[in-house]
Structures are given as structure tokens and as C-alpha cells.
Image (cartoon, helix red, strand yellow):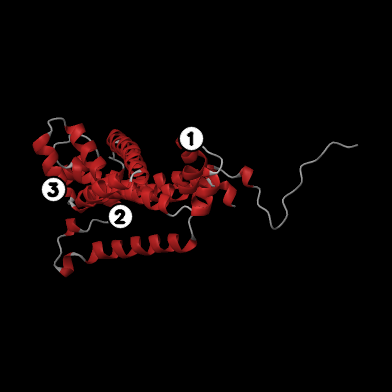
Amino acid sequence: MPPDEPRPATPFEEPIFERSPRSLMISSLPRETIISIVLFAAVWQVMSYLAPSLGIPAFAIPGLGRIAESLTKITLLDVAVTLGRVLLSLVVSFVIGLLVAVLMYLSESVEKYLRPMVRILMAVPVVSWILFAVLWFKGVEFRIVFVLVVVCAPVFTVDALDNMREVSRDLKQMIRSFRPTPFQFFHKLMLPAITPGIITSWKITLSLAIRVVTIAELVGAVTGIGHQLSVAQELFSVADVFAWTLVLVVLLFFLEALLVRLETHVLRWRA
């Protein structure tokens, strides 16, 4: 028999194995998104030309050329520091939030005492937590991580507990009929059942952490995107502010894309 030959792609198939990661990223953007970005950039450029005639200082609406020049001055060290703070804080927040949610799920008495405290933590403004951190702790890094954890952990707790409550009672009774240990009960039933909700919670908390970390870095930090935004503000460099803001947006999109890839891999059974 003749050796197997590679089957050419049909008109309805695309040879994705020949596409580079960059082309995959670009092609994944909807056409409407690209058009919206282009229109926004065009309007911004027009506004930069019309700013003086509108009574707005020219530096307040920098042109795309000045913003591009500021982007070339972006320091990767500050981006890496902010990314590290966000990821470390999110992991710690997730572990604490999940453990608290499990305790609240296992004990109704514990839930009665902890749920009001969780709600109170979520009601405290971020600015207040930053002030508390400055007054309570000396280490800048610990202050930033503390603020991020105290803001993000309650979100993980509430989402994880709500997802546990939504697991079918019939499934719980069926699993308990096999007399599993508590670890087996959570590992075989609860964890797979709440995984979609946990990933969704990560997506929400990720955007929250990106916003909070920049505010936390404004107080006392000498590195990070928040610190660079503070320096740009002191120098009245709107182009630098816009450039660092774009970096934050791109960083958020990149992390969300990684979460989507992870979600596709972990929940491939739903396809």
C-alpha cells in the first residue's frame, strides 16, 4: 500500500498548524473590535489637533506620535514587577477565599459568623484599605499585597460559596451513597462542579486586581506601573500617562487570554 499522504485542507478547513501565534492573536480579534479601535484612535488624533481651538491645553490631548514615543520608553522591569504583584496576590487571595468558602459550606454556624465579616470587607473602599496599610505596616511590598488580598479574597469566597450551593442535591446524595471521605467528596464532585464558576471569578477578580494594584502602587512604591503613573502625573506628561494606561490594558487582555486558554483546556469536556 502507498504511504499515507497529508490530506490537503478543504475549503471549509484552515491549516492552523502553519499559522504563527501572532497571526492567531490578530485573527482572534473580531472585525468590529479592530474597527472600534481604529475609529477611537482617529477621533483621538483629531481631538489632539483641535484641542487648542477648543480651549484645551495641547499637552492634555497628546497626538498618537507622542504616545508612541512614550511607549518606546516603557520599562519592562516595572511591568514585570506589577505583574508579579498581581499574580502573587491573586494566588494568595484564591487560596484564602476558597478555604473560607469551604469552611462556610461545611458549617452553618461558621457561615453565620463569617458571611457578615466578608460583606463588611467588600464594602470598605480601596482607598481606606490603602490608608490602613500605610498606618499598620512598614514594608511597601507587604502593603500592596495586603491591599490586593483583602480586596480580592472576599470576592473569591462569595463566588466559590455560591457555586457550591448551586451544585445539584441529587448529585450530592448520589456521591454520599458511596460513603466518600470529605476529601473525596470535594475532589470528585464539588471541585469539578464549581470549576467553571471559579474560572469566571478569576476573570472578574483579575480586572479588579489590575485596577487596585495601580492605586496601591501610588503610595510608597518606587517600582511598578502605578509608580510610573505617579511620576508622569507630577511631570504633567499626559502622553506617558496614556502610554502606561495602554500597557495596563494590554496586560489585562494578555492575562485574560491566558485564562481563556486555560478554560478551554480544563473544560474541553463541554465542547
Q: Which of marks 1 and 2 is nearer the N terminus?
A: 2
Task: Find residue 94 and name its label.
Answer: none
Residue 171 versus residue 42 in the image, above or below: above
- Disc 1 to disc 2, C-alpha distance: 61 Å
Q: Which residue is drawn at 30% across and 52% down?
A: 65
- Please name the residue that numbered disc 2 is placed on: 64
Residue 95 versus residue 45 in the image, above or below: above
Q: Which residue is drawn at 48% across and 55% down?
A: 29
**To which quarter of the image does residue 44 belong?**
bottom left
**Pointer 1: residues within 10 angstroms few (<14), some, or many (20+)?**
few
Task: Find residue 181 and name its label.
Answer: 1
User: Please, what is the three-letter code of the amino acid marked with disc 1?
Assistant: Thr
Q: Which of 13 and 122 is in front in this view?
A: 122
- Please name the residue that numbered disc 3 is placed on: 128
The answer to whether one can see residue 103 in this image is yes
Labels 3 and 2 touching (C-beta < 8 A) = no
Labels 1 and 3 touching (C-beta < 8 A) = no
Q: Which residue lies furthest to the left in this view?
A: 135
Q: Nearer the observer, disc 1 or disc 2?
A: 1
Q: Which of 180 and 9 is in front in this view?
A: 180
Q: Which of 201 and 15 is in front in this view?
A: 201
Residue 83's spot in the image, x, y percent? 32, 38
- Disc 1 to disc 3, C-alpha distance: 43 Å
- Disc 3 to disc 2, C-alpha distance: 36 Å
Q: Which of marks 1 and 3 is nearer the N terminus?
A: 3
Residue 69's spot in the image, x, y percent? 29, 46
Residue 24's spot in the image, x, y percent? 53, 48
